[in-house]
Amino acid sequence: MRILAVEDEPELARLLLVNLSRMGFATDHAACVEDAHALLDTCSYDLVLLDVRLPDGSGVDLLRQMRARRQEVPVILLPAADSVDDRVAGLGAGADDYVTKPFALEELVARMRAVLRRPGRALSLTLTAGNICFNSVTREVCVGDRHVALARRELAALESLMRADGRVVTREALEEAIYGLEEDRQSNVLESTLSRLRRRLEAEGAKVGIRVMRGVGYRITAEPTRAAA
Amino acid sequence: VLLHETPLVDPPIRDGLADAAPPKRPAGTWRGFWAALHRRRQRPASIERVLVLRLGSILVAAFLSFGVFYGLFIAGDAREQAAEEAADLAEALESSIVVQAGGLHFDLPADLAARIVARHALYGGVETAGGAAVGGSDPAVLARLRRGTAAQVQAAELTRGPGGLTLFAAAEGIAGVRALRVGVLQPVSNAGLAWTGVMREYREEILPTFAPALVLAFAVVWVTVRRSLQPLRRASAEAAAVSAERPGRRVSMDGVGAEIVPLIEAVNHAVARLEAALAVQTRFTANAAHEMRTPLAIIRARIDNLQDGPEKLAFQRDMDRVTRLVSQMLASARLQSGQVGRFERVDLVALARSTLADLAPLADAGGKELVLESGAPASVHGNAMSLESALRNLVENALRFTPAGEAVTVRVGPGPRIEVADRGPGIPADHLAHIFEPFWRAQDQRGDGAGLGLAIARDVALLHGGRLEVRNGVVGGAVFALDFPRQGAF
């Protein structure tokens, strides 16, 4: 993984570089828009971390220029101001995510992994949770070392939950995933799909649970769902 | 269930608009009437309405008084008119005479009889030769006819008698081969004469010519007033459209009268000063955010770089607290200067769902549950990020007071409203006045809250034309509600 960090504050840049390389990311550094352009034109990166206020311009403008030049590398903005319009502008300009300063390193790395894991980004990706594996390209599921065949809707729901990596997936997002765009939506299909999926995984001996957050959504957890739940 | 809950606060967060307590009704009818009149006056009247009504009244008054003066002016002629009428009557009577069995008799057709009755007139006729009376004649009229010659009775004459003023008119004619004279005697009054004259003028002269002119004049007044006020109406609409979301807008002075120009200039200057102040404030909060967050980010990175251990955990916890405080202070400063960002249609159910999903780890860490209850879809016109931060602060506050193993319940609707119910101890009455003050915390409350969350939620509610309410729930715990009553249309 090769990362470009665009950050003008030298001390923060130094610490970012040290910490990221310790976590296994090869990281280059640019301190201004001009340097960033030069590096982006010569090297190929898997991810760009982009400060918003730079001495010779705005990170959001740099991002716009990148997208205009068809540089489709994923970008995470690192704004220091939490003005809501900045975020909206950043996402509108083509950012994949933003992490407001100050951030915990773990938080930043988690977001980086999530962006790198998005559909269409990587050629092949195996998602894991507990003893379940999910190959996002072949769409094969295995529990332990056994393959498990799941229905289309159950597969879609499981993929959404596993991509969220333990975070809650809202009902809207799950419905979007299991229905796609063309189908009529019926009530209770979401509930029945997830309860089938849960029973199925339980029967296969999966060491994960699917927990409901009442009225909000679902998430996948490392411990199995209790039978009573 | 809601009915039994005790409403604790008439919130100290009045939105400052129409505090409409119904006025007491005064005892006396007259006082009541004056009070009603006074109330009517409190509502600003439409200038257009007032002008059209007043100018219209002036027109009608002018029209009426012109008629009256003209009528009085020509009242002198009224006598002649009355005489003419009496003479007409006499001639009509004369031609109604028939020869019957050698004698002459009045044989009045119905309409003539009615005219006679209407005027309280007396009538009679005599033959010029011999002086024989026509059948049906009144003796008083006969006496008058016999008294004078034809020439004398030809002209009408007014006589003042014991019964008042009477008018006598006569006509000559021939019935068969016999010449005769016919007379009419009718009571009149000066006022009556004048009135008859005025009415006659109205009927025959004034109304047919001036009524269309009056209608036309009224229409011209109306159109003129409307058109004169049009620039003012446009300027008002432009002034109403000035807002922080669309800076640079001003009220234009096209076509407005010289009297209105200073008002518009004053409004435009005030708007310009406010915009400049807001721009300074916006720059300040943005710079403050940048200047504070950058060193914090460096400190955070240094801490993450330390070796794992209790020391590092303690630093990280402190860091989280400072970060949260700075974020809240910056958010509060932005809201205080009215910076909320762009407004759009916001689905409250989806907003609550994603907010609660984000807060799930926080609830988990404390062994608490988050539950969302929602019925019909509800939405408001607002800024999604601000509304989310308001709800997040309310839920964080609720989680802080809810014991482990219990749930915080968020209810959306009915209507544009979100409630957050916790299972904590509720809010003592003597705290109610303070809970929305920035940095206020209960004496016995420790923990990481800075006391800004509720103030932020309230500011967001106010900037959306809504309010933040609080009451204690029937099963214990506090219930906070973001309510947007004036957005019912959405």
Image (cartoon, coloured by chain):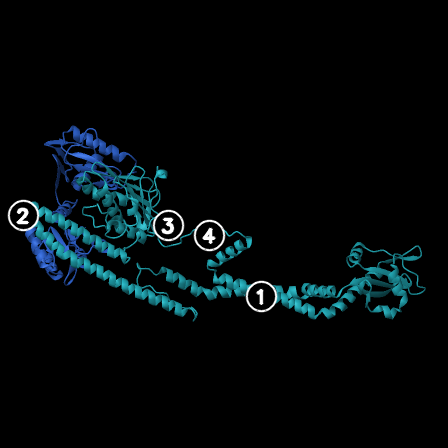
Chain colours: A blue, B cyan
**Residue depth check, mark 3 versus mark 4: number of the one nearer the observer:** 4
In this figure, which residue is indicated by the disc labeled 1?
B59
Question: Marks 2/1: CA distance?
Answer: 95 Å
Judge if badges 2 and 3 mark residues of a common chain: yes
In this figure, which residue is indicated by the disc labeled 2?
B307
Which of the two discs, 2 and 3, labels the residue nearer the N terminus? 2
- Residue B241, horizontal then vertical, whole percent: 36, 60
Please state the chain letter of the residue tagged with numbered disc 2 in the rendered image: B
Nearest the viewer among B463 and A36 is B463
Please state the chain letter of the residue tagged with numbered disc 3 in the rendered image: B
Q: Residue at x 17, y 40 (%)?
A: B365
Residue A16 is labelled as: none
Which of the two discs, 4 and 1, labels the residue nearer the N terminus? 4
Which of the two discs, 3 and 1, labels the residue nearer the N terminus? 1
Nearest the viewer among B316 and A115 is B316
Residue B486 is labelled as: 3
Q: What's the amino acid at mark 2?
A: Gln
- Residue B79, horizontal then vertical, whole percent: 76, 68
Which of the two discs, 2 and 1, labels the residue nearer the N terminus? 1
Q: What's the amino acid at mark 1?
A: Leu
Question: Marks 2/4: CA distance?
Answer: 72 Å
Q: Residue at x 32, y 43 (%)?
A: B471
- Residue B214, horizontal then vertical, whole percent: 59, 65
Q: Residue at x 14, y 63 (%)?
A: A55
- Left/right placement of residue B222 relative to residue B1 reads right
How many residues crowd mark 2 within 10 Å: few (<14), some (14–19), many (20+)? few
Which of the two discs, 3 and 4, labels the residue nearer the N terminus? 4
